[in-house]
Image: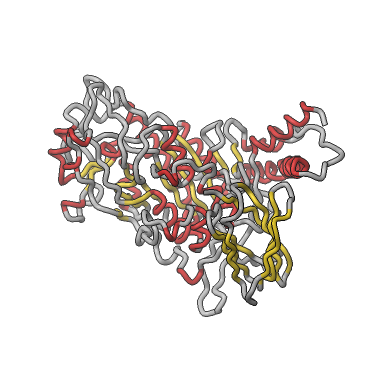
Amino acid sequence: MKRRNFIKLTSTASALSLLPTEVFALFNSAGLKTCPNVNAKKIVLIQLSGANDGLNTVVPINQYDTYAALRPNIKLNNIGGSNGIINLDSTLPLENQVGLHPALSGFKNLYDNGLMRLIQGVGYPIQDKSHFKSTDLWLTGGDGTPANNVLGSGWVGRFLENYFANFLTANFPLGIQLGSSENSLGFHGEIEHGMSLNINGQDPSGFYSIVNGLGGIAPTTIPNSEYGDLIQYILNNDTSTNTYAQTISAAFNSGSNSVTYPNTSLSNQLKTVAKFISGGLETKVYLVKISGFDTHNLQVASNTTTHTGSHADLLTQVSEAVTNFITDLNNQNIGDDVLAVTFSEFGRKAGENGNLGTDHGEIAPMFVFGSSLNAGISGTNIDLSEAIAGNNFQIQTVQHDYRRVFSTILQDWFGVSNPTLDLTFYDHTNNIGFAGNKISNLINTQNSVPPFCYNDVLLSTNSFNHSNEVIVYPNPSTETVSINSTSTINDITIYTIDGKLIGTYRNPLTSNNFTINVESLSIGMYSFKINTVNGSISKKVIIRR
């Protein structure tokens, strides 16, 4: 195979990063109740890149004087003043009332119409204030502790590859990225790297014609080796590229928008997502991005009122884009199926700097949008008494680990069980930082998935065979690996990644569960061939120390 053609093949597979998915519906196996149909549910992640200033986004009204003293030159005007902060909910007790930045009038309207929830004090243990590192941690499901500081895969990718692991045929990708030419680390799975389709810079209406024929000449002979397996994987992705492209273009061309969006980058991204969803594209996770939130200098405009400047401009773009997006979906009666969530790598200091700006901080608020929400505020007002010189004017108390927010959505929105959350967030149910502490009442009862409906691989009404579903966890593992199957497990054979036999372990019990001690295995990746009464399935497992 010529090197040039191989590069073409790898470029196509890497840039388009395609993954199969499924069509599914849930039913209570006992037949007592019907579980919510999650077939159409989607989540849109809105990345505010650069570290959004949470304190000028959400001002604690009960501590306005302290806030103003910390920020004498960049403070927002109080309620009632010219372009003052917007009281989000005056019906709350004063100690819980917050003021939105005046640029976020659209957020106020969404809140009043039951379409927004504010989550206070979001962060993670031992905050890393590097943009690159902290962004990686948010995307990988990590934190600043040594055990979770260097992760090579993303929490979205791990969720997708485990939740949809047994579905190998589909005509659409599970994830789509817009707004950045870089493939997000968040979509990289533990085994399957690159699970999103990055269409940045592409024309969705003619996407098929752009990608068609880019794969190069395929090799005629595939070697029987790990190298051959990788080549075959690339070829399979390349073969399916045109199918995905056709589906995406067809959805975009048949979709519609019911509102006029501003001509800004984020609005155009969300406008495209709305057309995809309106056109019937079944992609489950979208990622859009707006940059510029690293406001060290001129966060507010010099010699003007403080509601203008770079931060106000950015929040205006976010508010307008999100408001139009949610309105668009609801106008087309598809809003019940979509949640949108903002996130940023960290907040900023409570104290201003000498350049009409703010420096790197720690916690910040998150916003969740959609007609399936319970509108409200999760958490309490941040405590500005923490922002003292000895603390470098930081607010450090984390009320909500960001993984709690996302795991709540995965469980209550998609119906993900604890074993899959363990795989998604590395032993989630035993992690003291956020185990079992879901964001209460985030999704309304009508649209949330109750516990009896939680499943690892969703039951389908289509032609896929679900008679032999298998979950392997934790993965990665250090001591033991547990295998749960819908059918009786006979034995498990373990191979190294290059095919060397490690051994066969017979299930001592006639059961659907089996645990193997792997402490004797060297660090690396292994293939577990799991033989059940209904057939065999292979799973990749990573051993680490």
Q: On screen, 57 above or below 26? A: above
Extreme-right residue of the structure: 220
Say whether residue 317 is left or right of residue 299.
Answer: right
> How was this image coloured?
secondary structure
Towards the viewer: 305 or 368? 368
For the question of whether residue 469 can be seen, the reply is yes
Residue drawn at point x = 82 percent, y = 31 percent: 1
Q: Which residue lies furthest to the front in this view?
A: 520
Residue situated in front as seen by the camera: 450 or 243: 450
Q: Which of 52 and 443 is in front in this view?
A: 52
- Tell which of 335 and 525 is nearer to you: 525
Asked whether, in this view, residue 181 is left or right of residue 413, the answer is right
Query: Is 285 placed above or below 163 here?
Result: above
Q: How many labels does the image show?
A: 0
Q: Residue at x 53, y 39 (%)?
A: 185
Using the rendered view, name the quadrant where residue 507 is placed.
bottom right
Horizontal and vertical percent position of residue 469: 64, 65
User: Residue 350: x and y, percent?
Assistant: 23, 35
Q: Can residue 458 be seen in this view?
A: no
Q: Which residue lies at the image location 63% right of the left edge and 64% below the top edge?
A: 470
Q: Residue furthest top?
A: 303
Location of residue 321 (image quadrant): top left
Picture coordinates of residue 434 (x, y %)?
Answer: 38, 55
Which quadrant of the view contains residue 242?
top right
Q: Is residue 231 above or below residue 281?
A: above
Image spot of residue 544 (x, y percent): 55, 49
Q: Is 175 displayed left or right of 87 in the figure?
A: right
